[in-house]
Image: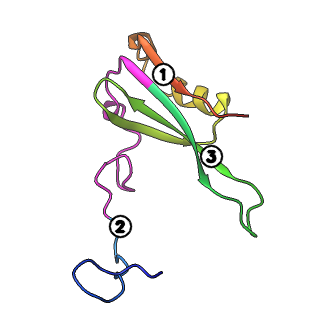
């Protein structure tokens, strides 16, 4: 069944541009600005599949998202779901940043 646009009987138009409201997701975001993340007291980590296998890529790709749980906002996303990927992101934070975190929530993968 084909989806139709709610205001017409024709097919839904394809979007011409993708508007990303969060600066972390926009390509022009100042990703190297340490002030972008700021102080965090409750950190959430969640991994998810990003790209499924295809004929060109024989494996599923994963990402790990870092979330400020006190002020629900996405802090950053890194490729992979390994401890090394998480450690690499954590050591890039300013001195003393990690000491300010008093709670961490993880959503580990099954496997």
> Which residues are the magenta region?
19-43
Q: Which residue is mark 3?
A: 62
Quadrant position of residue 34: top left
Secondary structure that dominates the magenta span: loop
Secondary structure at numbered mark 3:
strand
Eyeballing the image, is 98 above or below 63?
above
The answer to whether residue 17 is magenta is no
Q: Marks 3 and 2, how far apart in space?
A: 22 Å
Please report contact status of discs 1 and 2: CB closer than 8 Å, yes or no: no
The x and y percentages for residue 106 are 53, 25
Looking at this rendering, what residue extends furthest in the bottom direction?
10
The residue to which callout 1 is attached is 105
The verdict on residue 26 being magenta is yes
Give the mark nearer the N terminus: 1 vs 2. 2
- Please report the residue visible at 39 percent of the width from the left and 51 percent of the height from the top: 25
Name the foreground residue: 82 vs 26.
82
Reading the chain from its start, which is encountered first: label 1 or label 3? 3
> Residue 69's image quarter?
top left
Q: Is residue 9 above or below residue 81?
A: below
Return the mark for residue 18: 2
Q: Residue at x 71, y 66 (%)?
A: 54
Q: Earlier in the sequence, mark 3 or mark 2?
A: 2
- The answer to whether 87 is drawn above or below residue 101 in the figure is below
Q: Residues within 10 Å of mark 2 (few under 14, many from 20)?
A: few
- Residue shown at 24% from the left, 86% from the top: 8
């Amino acid at each position: 069944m084909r989806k139709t646009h709610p205001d017409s009987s024709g097919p839904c138009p394809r979007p011409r541009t993708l508007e990303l409201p969060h600066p972390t997701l926009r390509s022009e975001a100042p990703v190297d600005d340490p002030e972008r993340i700021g102080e965090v007291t409750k950190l959430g980590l969640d991994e998810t599949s990003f790209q499924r296998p295809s004929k060109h890529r024989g494996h599923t790709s994963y990402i790990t998202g870092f979330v400020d749980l006190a002020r629900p906002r996405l802090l950053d996303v890194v490729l992979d779901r390994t401890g090394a990927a998480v450690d690499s992101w954590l050591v890039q934070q300013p001195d003393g940043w990690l000491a300010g975190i008093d709670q961490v929530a993880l959503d580990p993968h099954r496997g």
